[in-house]
Image: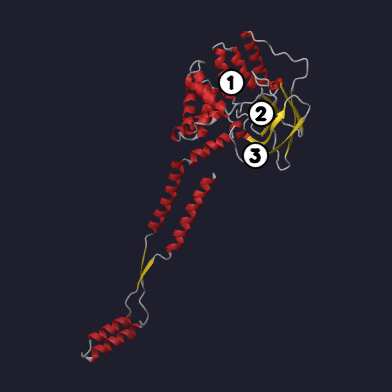
């Protein structure tokens, strides 16, 4: 039994007990006439009359022995009223529970929690329930997001695009939604990027420079129009978010190499001399409690500029603190070189989502004006971040 059902039944029970207890007070006593009352009335009527009649009345009272009050007549409220009230409360509670939506939402949440053990039939039943519930509650971002992800993964981009359009009406500045909407539109249009989808992707990158969906979509669009240099640029930025040796890293490396070959672009060659960069040591503030499997991003940007686009990025999964990191041209974003900068602003983000961006960060550290190309080691201390910030 769900918690909402429990409290609903508890409320009905309390009301029922109160009604039953108060029923004993639902009486309106009507006092009956006593024999003494009758005698007084007769005495008033027989004033000046025959004394024998008066004595006869007194004897009748003595013979009956009625100096007590005649049994009161009590008029009680009908028990049907109490039953009707209890049934009304119960039925009305169930009606509200179902119509407001708590029951359907609780059922879906419980099924989602058991999704790992679900059969394909269970998944289809759950999907049908989410579709029905999303139609009833079109402003529910959770349901629309589930449908959008499902439709994208099941090659139904038109339906996914409809879901993301609905979500963007509610949260037009959410970078993840903007990136996903651009991806769905690109696929729904036969791998063509129209002006609206391009605008969504660029907005996503302006809000979140490392937005995977936007970078991937813009890279695919550039590849389709045979602008291989631009495709490599976008995909190269995505590659910085992947851990070397993982399937995602290997796949991106392969498509980047293919784009380079098709575009006649020079392959990246490992330098024979040490690269010019910045040496960083990252540690954590003692007040920051680490959870399982954090990810750390170390970013470098041109010093003193307002742009959020990083010049170089290093990602470290499950770091051991303190950790040493070198930012140089080998980890620079496509089309940029850290060695071209004299000074850089450094930033460290600690996250449990695996995504870069301060919106997902649990801890952050910053250092301005680090000199590039020296042997100096710059230390950054990650401190807790109290609320999400802009990217």
Quadrant of res 221: top right
Above or below: residue 314 compared with residue 43 = above
Question: Would you place residue 90 above or below residue 330 in this image?
Answer: below
Q: Earlier in the sequence, mark 2 or mark 3?
A: 2
Cα separation, mark 2 vs mark 3, equals 22 Å
The residue pinned by badge 2 equals 303
Query: For numbered disc 1, what is the local secondary structure?
Result: helix
Q: Secondary structure at mark 2?
A: loop
Q: Could one spot residue 120 in this view of the protein?
A: no
Pointer 3 residue: 385
Answer few, some or many: residues within 10 Å of disc 1's Cα (few below 14, many 20 plus, some between 14 and 19): many
| Residue 176, image x, y percentages | 55, 29
Q: Of all residues shown, which one is farthest toward the left?
A: 49
Specify whether 234 is left or right of 20. right
Q: Which mark is residue 141?
A: none
Residue 80 or 127: which is nearer the viewer? 127
Query: In front here: 226 or 127?
Result: 226
Q: Is residue 69 left or right of residue 232?
A: left
* Quadrant of the frame with the C terminus: top right
Q: CA distance from mark 1 to mark 3?
A: 29 Å
Q: Position of residue 285 (x, y in %)?
A: 72, 40
């Amino acid at each position: 039994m769900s918690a909402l059902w429990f409290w609903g039944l508890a409320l009905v029970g309390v009301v029922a007990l109160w009604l039953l207890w108060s029923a004993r007070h639902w009486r309106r006593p009507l006092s009956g006439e006593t024999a003494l009352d009758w005698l007084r009335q007769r005495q008033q009527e027989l004033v000046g009359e025959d004394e024998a009649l008066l004595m006869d009345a007194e004897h009748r009272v003595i013979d009956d022995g009625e100096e007590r009050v005649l049994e009161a007549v009590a008029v009680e409220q009908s028990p049907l009223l109490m039953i009707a009230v209890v049934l009304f409360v119960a039925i009305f509670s169930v009606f509200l529970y179902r119509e407001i939506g708590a029951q359907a939402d609780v059922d879906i949440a419980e099924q989602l929690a058991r999704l790992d053990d679900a059969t394909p039939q269970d998944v289809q039943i759950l999907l049908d329930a989410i579709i029905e519930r999303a139609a009833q509650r079109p402003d529910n971002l959770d349901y629309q997001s589930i449908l959008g992800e499902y439709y994208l993964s099941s090659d139904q981009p038109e339906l996914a695009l409809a879901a993301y359009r609905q979500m963007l009406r509610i949260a037009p500045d959410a970078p993840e939604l903007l990136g996903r909407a651009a991806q769905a539109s690109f696929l729904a249009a036969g791998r063509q990027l129209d002006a609206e989808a391009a605008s969504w992707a660029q907005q996503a990158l302006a809000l979140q420079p490392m937005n995977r969906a936007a970078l991937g979509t813009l890279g695919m669009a550039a590849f389709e129009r045979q602008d291989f240099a631009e495709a490599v640029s976008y995909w190269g930025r995505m590659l910085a978010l992947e851990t070397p040796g993982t399937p995602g890293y290997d796949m991106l490396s392969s498509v980047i190499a293919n784009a380079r070959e098709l575009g006649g672009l020079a392959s990246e060659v490992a330098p024979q001399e040490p690269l010019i960069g910045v040496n960083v040591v990252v540690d954590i503030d003692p007040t920051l409690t680490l959870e399982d499997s954090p990810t750390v991003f170390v970013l470098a940007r041109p010093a003193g500029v307002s742009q959020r686009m990083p010049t170089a990025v290093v990602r470290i999964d499950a770091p051991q603190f303190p950790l040493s990191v070198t930012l140089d041209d080998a980890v620079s974003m496509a089309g940029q070189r850290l060695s071209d900068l004299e000074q850089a602003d450094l930033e460290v983000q600690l996250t449990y989502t695996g995504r870069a961006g301060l919106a997902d960060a649990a801890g952050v550290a910053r250092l301005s004006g680090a000199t590039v190309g020296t042997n100096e080691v710059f230390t950054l201390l990650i401190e807790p971040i109290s609320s999400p910030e802009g990217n």
